[in-house]
Amino acid sequence: QVQLVESGGGLVQAGGSLTLSCAASGRTFSRNAMGWFRQAPGKEREFVAAISWSGAFTGYVDSVKGRFTISRENAKVTVILQMNNLKPEDTAVYYCAASRFLGGVVRDENEYDYWGQGTQVTVSS
């Protein structure tokens, strides 16, 4: 059974930091582009960040550029989202996903085949 499991969410004050991790089991995603998405209450799920299979290419939604960093450790089949200078508007459930594509930055959620169950991030003002 293929699983993506997120961890690292929680409650933090504005200006603080959190590190989200996504661990894969059941198969390796070392040859897949990976991404993070988020869904705030009452809003649609949105793209946050993505990384190519090699890690050479990354992309971010404008609202998190300069604050979030996505990385991957293929040997451990783990994708990391380092979130700094968090803002209340970053509050959401964050989802890890694995794309069917290898290279490039995949921003379209319809191009992702596997999803984790999500981890809650709450930023207080």
Image: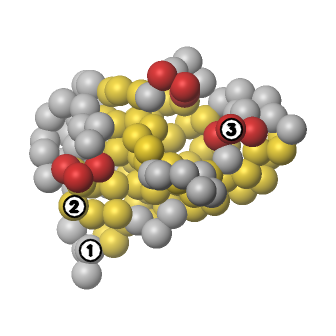
**Label 1, on which residue?**
2
Amino acid type shown at disc 2: Asp
Q: Residue at x 55, y 18 (%)?
A: 66
Residue 8 appears at what percent x and percent y? 62, 55
Indicate whether 114 appears above or below 14: below
Judged by depth in the image, the label closer to the viewer, 3 or 2, is 3
Amino acid type shown at disc 3: Glu
Task: Name the N-terminal-most of marks 3 and 2.
Answer: 3
Residue 41 appears at what percent x and percent y? 62, 57
The answer to which of 110 and 105 lies nearer the viewer is 110
The answer to which of 83 and 37 lies nearer the viewer is 37
Mark 3, secondary structure of its residue: helix
Task: Name the N-terminal-most of marks 2 and 1.
Answer: 1
Looking at the rendering, in which quadrant would you find the N terminus?
Answer: bottom left
Circle 2/circle 1 CB separation < 8 Å: no
Mark 1, secondary structure of its residue: loop
Circle 3/circle 1 CB separation < 8 Å: no
Q: Residue at x 48, y 22 (%)?
A: 62
CA gap between label 3 and label 1 equals 31 Å
CA gap between label 2 and label 1 equals 11 Å
Give the number of the disc on residue 89.
3
Q: Is residue 15 left or right of residue 67?
A: right
Amino acid type shown at disc 1: Val
Task: Name the N-terminal-most of marks 3 and 1.
Answer: 1
**Label 2, on which residue?**
113
Q: Quadrant of residue 5?
A: bottom left
Q: Badge 1 local density, few (<14 within 10 Å), some, or many (20+)?
A: few
